[in-house]
Image (cartoon, helix red, strand yellow):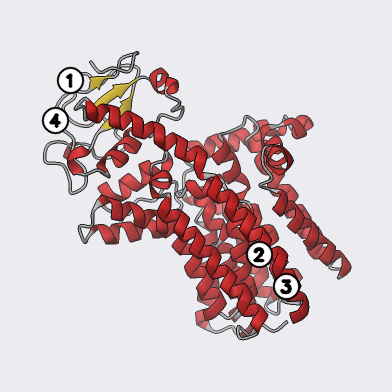
C-alpha cells in the first residue's frame, strides 16, 4: 500500500497514533505525583532540580532529554508542581516527537506506527517508572530504522552519513542492551534487501562489538558489574530455566495474574505466519532467535527475581522486535485489507492502554502510604525524621533507599515551607544540623535559607518510634 499520508486508511492509522499519545499525555498529567514520587524517579528528578549541571546516570548519555527540559523550565523560577509535571510529560514527549518526525518529516508512516505499537505492547507498570532508560528502546531504534530505510536507501550524502551513525549512538548510549536493539534493527533491514549493504555491515559490526568498546571507555558501575556476574551464575541454573522467576513472570502475566503479554505473543505469531507465507525464512529465523535470545538473557540474568516493575522493565525492549517488522508488513497490505487490519490494531492499542491506566493502582498505593506518613509528620510539626527499615516495612513501604527524596518531593508540592524528609537508618544521625542524605547530593544548602523549591530547618532529626509516634 502507498505510504502517501493522504490515503484515507493510512490517515486513519496516523490519527490513531496521535490519539494514543494524547491518552498517554493525559495519564502522565493525571498521575504525575505517582510517576515522579517513586524510588529511582524521585531521586533522579530531585537531582535534576537541585544539583547544578547535567547529570548522567551510569554513562547513559542519551537519556538526558527530560532532564534538560526540566532544567530549562527551572531557570524561569517555575513552581515545583510545574517542574514535576514537565518531568512526567517529557517522557511521553520524546517518543511522540519521534513519531511525528518519522511519519511527517521522513515520510515513513509505517515505521512511525511501529513506534506507536511498541509504546504499549509490553508496557504496563514501567509507564510509572519514568527514569527507566529501557523505555527509550521503544523509540530510539525506530528513528534508526527510519533513517536507514529512508534517507540511507536513497542517498549517501554527507548529512545522511552523519545522521545515521548519530541515530545509532542514540540507541547504543541509552542502555546496556541498546546494542542488541541496534543489531536487531540493522540485520532486519539488511535481510529485507537494503541497497547500502556495505554501510549496513559496518554499522552492524560496530554495534556487535560496542559492549567491548564501551567496557574499555567506561568503567561499569557496581550495579552493572553485579549484573554481569549474575548472568554467569544464571547459566548454572539453565536446567531449571522454566521455573526461574523471569520465565514465570512472562507466563503469569500472559494467562494467570494478568493477560498483559498476550497481545505480544499474538502479534508475534501473526508476524511469523505472514513471514512463513512469504517464505521469508531468514527474517523469520532472525526474529525468533532475537526474541528467544533476549528472553533467555534476562531470565538467566535475573534468576534471583526482582520487583514487578523491574522485572517488566527487563522485557520492555522486546516490543520493538515485533512492532517494527509487523508494521513493515502492513505496508504490503491493500487499502481494503488495511481497513480490516485497523480493527485488531485499534483493539490492541486500547487494551494495552487500558492495562497501563489500571497499573496506576499499585504504584498509587505506595504514594498513598508515603502521603499518610508526610501528613502525620506535618501534623506533629516535624520536618526532619528518622525511621528504621522495620518501621517502614510495617507501613507497607518496602523499598527504602530513596525515601528521603520521595518524602521531600511530595511534601514540597504543598509549598517550600512544607518540605520534610524521612531518612532511613538503624541509628538516627547524631546531632545533625543539616540534611543527611548519605552524601548522594549536595545537602547543606537545603537547610536554613533553602532553595527556591525546598527548605528544611537547621537542627537534629526526630526519631520515629516503634509505635509510630515522634520523640
Kindly tell me whether residue 208 is visible in this rendering.
Answer: no
First of labels 2, 1 by sequence position: 2
How far is disc 4 from disc 3 in space, using C-alphas? 63 Å
Q: Nearer the viewer, mark 4 or mark 1?
A: 4
Q: Which residue is mark 4?
A: 458
Q: What residue appears at the point 70 percent right and 37 percent down from the top-left corner?
A: 252
Q: What residue appears at the point 17 percent right and 20 percent down from the top-left corner?
A: 431
First of labels 4, 3 by sequence position: 3
Where residue 142 sits, quadrant-wise, is bottom right
How far is disc 2 from disc 4 in space, using C-alphas? 56 Å
Direction from residue 18 to residue 305 in the image, left or right: right
Q: Secondary structure at mark 1?
A: loop
How far is disc 3 from disc 2 in space, using C-alphas? 14 Å
Q: Which residue is mark 2?
A: 346
Q: Which residue is mark 3?
A: 330
Q: Secondary structure at mark 4?
A: loop
Amino acid at each position: 500500500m502507498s505510504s502517501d499520508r493522504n490515503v484515507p486508511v493510512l490517515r486513519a492509522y496516523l490519527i490513531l497514533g496521535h490519539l494514543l499519545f494524547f491518552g498517554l499525555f493525559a495519564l502522565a498529567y493525571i498521575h504525575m505525583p505517582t510517576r515522579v514520587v517513586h524510588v529511582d524517579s524521585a531521586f533522579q528528578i530531585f537531582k535534576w532540580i537541585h544539583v547544578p549541571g547535567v547529570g548522567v546516570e551510569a554513562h547513559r548519555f542519551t537519556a538526558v532529554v527530560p532532564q534538560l527540559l526540566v532544567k530549562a523550565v527551572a531557570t524561569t523560577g517555575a513552581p515545583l508542581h510545574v517542574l514535576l509535571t514537565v518531568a512526567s510529560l517529557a517522557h511521553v514527549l520524546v517518543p511522540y516527537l519521534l513519531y511525528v518526525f518519522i511519519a511527517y518529516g521522513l515520510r515513513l508512516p509505517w515505521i512511525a506506527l511501529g513506534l506507536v505499537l511498541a509504546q504499549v505492547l509490553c508496557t504496563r507498570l514501567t509507564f510509572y517508572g519514568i527514569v527507566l532508560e529501557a523505555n527509550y528502546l521503544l523509540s530510539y531504534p525506530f528513528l534508526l530504522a527510519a533513517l536507514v530505510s529512508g534517507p540511507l536507501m536513497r542517498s549517501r550524502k554527507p548529512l545522511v552519513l552523519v545522521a545515521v551513525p548519530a541515530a545509532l549512538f542514540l540507541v547504543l548510549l541509552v542502555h546496556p542492551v541498546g546494542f542488541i536493539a541496534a543489531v536487531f534493527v540493522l540485520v532486519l533491514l539488511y535481510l529485507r534487501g537494503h541497497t547500502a549493504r556495505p554501510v549496513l555491515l559496518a554499522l552492524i559490526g560496530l554495534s556487535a562489538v560496542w559492549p567491548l568498546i564501551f567496557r574499555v571507555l567506561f568503567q561499569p558501575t557496581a550495579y552493572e558489574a553485579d549484573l554481569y556476574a549474575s548472568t554467569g551464575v544464571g547459566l548454572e541454573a539453565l536446567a531449571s530455566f522454566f521455573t526461574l522467576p523471569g520465565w514465570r513472570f512472562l507466563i503469569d502475566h500472559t494467562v494467570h495474574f494478568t493477560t498483559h503479554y498476550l497481545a505480544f505473543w499474538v502479534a508475534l505469531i501473526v508476524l511469523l505466519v505472514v513471514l512463513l507465507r512469504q517464505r521469508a525464512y531468514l527474517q523469520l529465523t532472525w526474529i525468533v532467535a532475537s526474541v528467544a535470545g533476549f528472553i533467555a538473557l534476562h531470565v538467566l540474568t535475573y534468576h534471583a527475581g526482582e520487583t514487578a516493575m523491574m522485572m517488566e522493565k527487563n522485557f520492555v525492549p522486546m516490543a520493538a522486535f515485533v512492532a517494527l517488522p509487523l508494521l513493515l508488513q502492513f505496508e504490503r497490505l491493500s487499502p481494503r485489507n488495511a481497513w480490516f487490519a485497523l480493527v485488531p490494531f485499534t483493539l490492541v492499542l486500547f487494551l494495552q492502554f487500558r492495562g497501563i491506566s489500571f497499573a496506576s493502582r499499585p504504584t498509587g498505593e505506595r504514594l498513598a502510604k508515603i502521603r499518610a506518613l508526610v501528613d502525620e509528620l506535618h501534623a506533629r510539626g516535624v520536618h526532619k525524621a528518622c525511621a528504621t527499615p522495620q518501621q517502614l516495612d510495617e507501613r507497607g513501604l518496602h523499598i527504602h533507599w530513596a525515601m528521603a527524596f520521595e518524602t521531600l518531593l511530595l511534601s514540597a508540592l504543598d509549598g517550600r515551607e512544607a518540605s520534610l524528609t524521612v531518612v532511613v537508618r538503624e541509628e538516627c544521625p547524631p546531632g545533625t544540623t543539616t540534611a543527611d542524605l548519605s552524601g548522594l547530593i549536595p545537602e547543606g544548602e537545603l537547610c536554613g535559607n533553602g532553595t527556591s523549591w525546598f527548605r528544611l530547618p537547621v537542627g537534629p532529626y526526630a526519631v520515629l518510634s516503634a509505635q509510630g509516634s515522634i520523640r
